[in-house]
Amino acid sequence: QVHLVESGGGLVQAGGSLRLSCEASGSISGIDAMGWYRQAPTNQRELVATITNGGMAHYLDTVKGRFTISYDNAKNMVYLQMNSLTPEDTAVYFCNARLNGIWSRDWGQGTQVTVSS
């Protein structure tokens, strides 16, 4: 079982920035990628960004150029730097880990990001 703990959310004004962190522990041997997802109250959970342990990143179109994902392999930490935030970014943000090509079914508690206009 993978244990994921997210942190760094909060309330910020539009145009502001936040940096989210996520630590993975437990059965984490074989992690080959990590990712950030988000879920707004009335929406399905959507994939925001992923990064492989080789550093290859992919982003949701609406966050490209504003969000940056990074991964510290040694610490099993993944980060999401979010700049130029808009109210549409308001959601609970979750991280997830991919082990040997399969995304984990284990989720953390998430961290709330609220962007005021």
Image (cartoon, grey):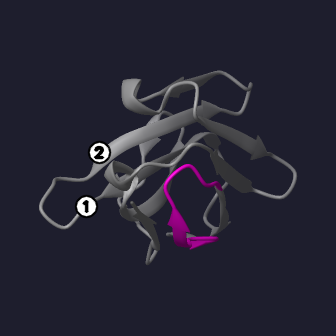
Residue nearest the observer in this picture, 104 or 56: 56
- The residue under the point 52% across, 24% down is 58
Residue 66's disc number: none
* Nearer to the camera, 23 or 13: 13
Q: Position of residue 12 (x, y in %)?
A: 54, 67
- Residue depicted at 62% across the width and 44% down the height: 83
Inspect the image, locate mark 2, and give the three-letter code of the amino acid beneath it. Glu
Q: Amino acid at mark 1?
A: Ala
Instruction: Find residue 85 and report its horizontal and vertical position in percent.
Output: 51, 49
Question: Percent from the top left, x then y, of residue 117?
Answer: 39, 60
State whether residue 89 is above or below residue 112. Answer: above
The magenta span reads 5-17
Q: Nearer the viewer, residue 90 or 38?
A: 90
Q: Which mark is residue 46?
A: 2
Image position of 14 (left or right of 89): right
Q: Give the numbered dot on residue 40.
A: 1
Q: Position of residue 22 (x, y in %)?
A: 64, 63
Q: CA distance from mark 1 to mark 2?
A: 9 Å
Residue appearing at x 36%, y 55% in the figure: 87
User: Which label lies toward us, 1 or 2?
Assistant: 1
Residue furthest to the right: 74
The answer to which of 73 and 70 lies nearer the viewer is 70
Q: Earlier in the sequence, mark 1 or mark 2?
A: 1
